[in-house]
């Protein structure tokens, strides 16, 4: 695990009492999405979900809430099957007592966010829960926070969060095409010249803060009586799994 990522807000590492305490303090759950995909020869295949998850952990550390484990499902799969599965996941999170559900995709294509939003529609329909689908930089995009494909931004994210899984030597020193096409499959600014851990740290800082502010806004948008943790207790009498 990266030194930047605290297990204290990651649901898979939390004990029942820790989950209940966190959810009562700020009843928000963040769900990271991604896929296994080519990201150059220098980055891990799970880059998209890894960066979304890591940014959400930083967000929860700062603002509160808990982070669900990364979900490796994406919009290229059959939506007839995928959307109902995700809706059921979100419904279970609602029944766990969360009032805000934020699905964040590190796979920066519009269809991925649309998939999350469609799955959320029946979950938020009665107004007792709020939810939104985002890219990790949807709310922070600018000069210091952006995305690409395995180039400056995504390489910087991995340099910051998971440096042991980045191998820049795999890119060599020669010509590198940056138009998303073979043989490099990279899109954006040359990561050998523009990527750094510092760029990744700033990108993550801005993205996490923007998502946290959106979580606060969504919770405040609910009727006053619907802003508190909605389950009597995290105990076998009231809850078992999600």
Image (spheres, rainbow, N blue to C red):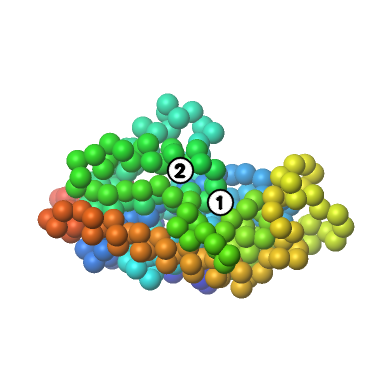
Q: Quadrant of residue 24?
A: bottom left
Q: Please give the residue where the numbered disc 2 appears in the rendered image.
A: 113
Picture coordinates of residue 143 (x, y %)?
Answer: 58, 65
Residue at horizontal 41 percent and vertical 41 percent from the top:
116
Q: Earlier in the sequence, mark 1 or mark 2?
A: 1
Q: Quadrant of residue 200?
A: bottom right
Picture coordinates of residue 114 (x, y %)?
Answer: 44, 39
Disc 1 to disc 2, how far (Cα)?
Answer: 13 Å
Give the residue at the far right of this rendering: 174
Q: Please give the residue where the numbered disc 1 appears in the rendered image.
A: 48
Badge 1: residue crowd in 10 Å (few <14, some 14–19, many ≥20): many
Q: Secondary structure at mark 1?
A: helix
Q: Is residue 172 left or right of residue 76?
A: right
Residue at horizontal 42 percent and vertical 26 percent from the top:
80
Residue at horizontal 29 percent and vertical 60 percent from the top:
217
* The one of 78 and 242 positioned closer to us in this rendering: 78
């Amino acid at each position: 695990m990266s030194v930047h990522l605290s297990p204290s807000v990651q649901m898979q590492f939390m004990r029942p009492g820790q989950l209940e305490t966190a959810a009562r303090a700020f009843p928000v759950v963040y769900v990271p999405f991604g896929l296994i995909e080519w990201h150059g020869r220098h980055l891990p295949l799970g880059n998209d979900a890894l960066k979304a998850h890591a940014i959400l952990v930083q967000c929860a550390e700062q603002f509160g809430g808990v982070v669900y484990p990364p979900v490796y499902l994406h919009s290229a799969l059959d939506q007839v099957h995928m959307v109902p599965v995700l809706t059921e996941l979100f419904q279970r999170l609602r029944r766990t007592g969360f009032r805000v559900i934020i699905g964040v995709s590190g796979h920066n294509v519009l269809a991925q966010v649309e998939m999350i939003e469609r799955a959320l529609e029946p979950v938020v329909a009665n107004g007792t829960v709020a939810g939104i689908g985002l890219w990790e930089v949807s709310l922070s995009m600018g000069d210091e926070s952006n995305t690409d494909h395995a180039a400056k931004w995504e390489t910087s994210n991995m340099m910051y969060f998971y440096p042991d899984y980045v191998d820049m030597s795999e890119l060599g020193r020669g010509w590198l095409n940056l138009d998303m096409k073979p043989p490099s499959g990279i899109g954006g600014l040359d990561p050998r010249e523009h990527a750094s851990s510092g760029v990744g740290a700033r990108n993550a800082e801005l993205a996490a803060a923007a998502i946290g502010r959106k979580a606060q806004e969504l919770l405040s948008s609910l009727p006053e009586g619907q802003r508190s943790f909605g389950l009597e207790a995290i105990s076998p009498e009231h809850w078992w799994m999600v």
